[in-house]
Amino acid sequence: MKSTVYISGVGALSSAGGIDESWQSLLAGHHCLSNTSDLGYVGKLPSNYESMVSDLEHQKDFRSYDRVCLLALLASREASYRSDKDDFNNYGTIYGSSRGATTALEQQHNRFVSSG
């Protein structure tokens, strides 16, 4: 089965912000990371995006979602808002993370280390 696929919008969430801020940061050579003594380089989400994540975490439908999944969901929402689609009946979104459900993996690792 062959189908034509159109990319009508892109989205991203990073320590620089959304897709526009992230792209400008990359072009300028800024990484938006801070060096911490115990974790190495880490990025902090801008407060407006952090509040969006917090809002989702408090909604019943999203309480069980890993934080990484919520970030990917917000990036996919940005892509849909930026698309030229008015009719979402024939529309799909693919989103992902290079690391998966990081919070859940870290919790399981800590439980394994503490209990043997």
Image: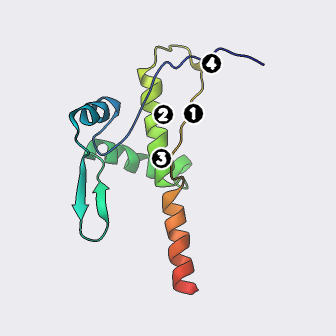
Tag 1 residue? 94
Pinpoint residue 25: horizontal percent, then vertical percent: 25, 36
Pinpoint residue 73: horizontal percent, then vertical percent: 49, 40
Say which amino acid is labelled 1.
Answer: Ile
Looking at the rendered image, the disc whose residue lies closer to the viewer, 1 or 4, is 1
Report helix, strand or loop for mark 2: helix
Say which amino acid is labelled 2.
Answer: Ser
Q: Residue at x 30, y 46 (%)?
A: 15
Q: Can residue 28 be seen from the camera position used here?
A: yes
Q: Say whether residue 6 is left or right of residue 58.
A: right
For marks 2 and 1, the one nearer the N-term is 2
Report helix, strand or loop for mark 3: helix
Tag 3 residue? 70
Residue situated in front as seen by the camera: 107 or 61:
107
Say which amino acid is labelled 4.
Answer: Asn
Residue 81 lies, with reference to residue 68, above or below; the image says above
Q: Label 4 vs label 3: CA separation? A: 23 Å
Q: Label 3 vs label 1: CA separation? A: 14 Å
Residue situated in front as seen by the camera: 17 or 70:
17
How does the figure colour the protein chain or chains? rainbow
Looking at the rendered image, the disc whose residue lies closer to the viewer, 2 or 4, is 2
Q: Can residue 58 be seen from the camera position used here?
A: no
**10 Å crowding of disc 3: few (<14), some (14-19), many (20+):** some
Q: Label 2 vs label 4: CA separation? A: 16 Å
For marks 2 and 3, the one nearer the N-term is 3
Q: Residue at x 47, y 51 (%)?
A: 68
